[in-house]
Amino acid sequence: MDPESLRALGRRFWYAWGAATLASLAAVVGAAVVIAPEDAWVVVLTGALAVVFVAIAAVSLTQGDGLDAAGMVVAAVGWAVWSVGAATGLLDQTLWTGWTLIAVGGAVSLWADHGHRVRGAVGG
């Protein structure tokens, strides 16, 4: 993603993107306070990270980078798994599933962003 292609999306996209992201973050905070008032901060933190990763994936998708978007969505699912685990008190049971999804999603996104450099360095 270069700055010019991001500017080309226009203000209307960025306003809609920002409004959707803020509304989603507000929904996460509201749900966390209602569902898990004693551990709301953990649910808010992990839920907010899930929202942010989905928001970044939406931008990647508009730029035609489907692999990066897919990696971000997989990582977002990992954060959502942790959020649900914290909200239900099952964080111990969801720890490794969430961590694995976050790591795999991050690896896919890194490959999408930097794979051409790796292939160039190894002669592929």
Image: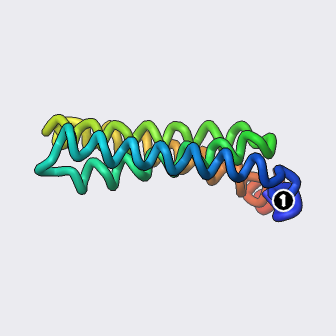
**Closer to the camera in the image, 18 or 67:** 18
Could you tell me which residue is drawn at 31 percent across and 51 percent down?
Answer: 44
Amino acid, disc 1: Arg
**Closer to the camera in the image, 7 or 124:** 7
Depicted 32 relative to depicted 120: above or below? above
Residue 54 lies, in percent from the top left, at: 55, 43
The residue wearing badge 1 is 7
Could you tell me which residue is drawn at 19 percent across and 42 percent down?
Answer: 91
Q: As drawn, is 124 to the left or to the right of 39? A: right
Q: As drawn, is 55 to the left or to the right of 30? A: right
Residue 7 lies, in percent from the top left, at: 84, 59
Image quarter (top left, top right, bottom left or bottom right) of the N terminus:
bottom right
Q: As drawn, is 73 to the left or to the right of 12? A: left
Could you tell me which residue is drawn at 44 percent across and 37 percent down?
Answer: 77
**Closer to the camera in the image, 117 or 92:** 92
Q: Secondary structure at mark 1?
A: helix
Could you tell me which residue is drawn at 88 percent across and 62 percent down?
Answer: 4
Q: As drawn, is 41 to the left or to the right of 1? A: left
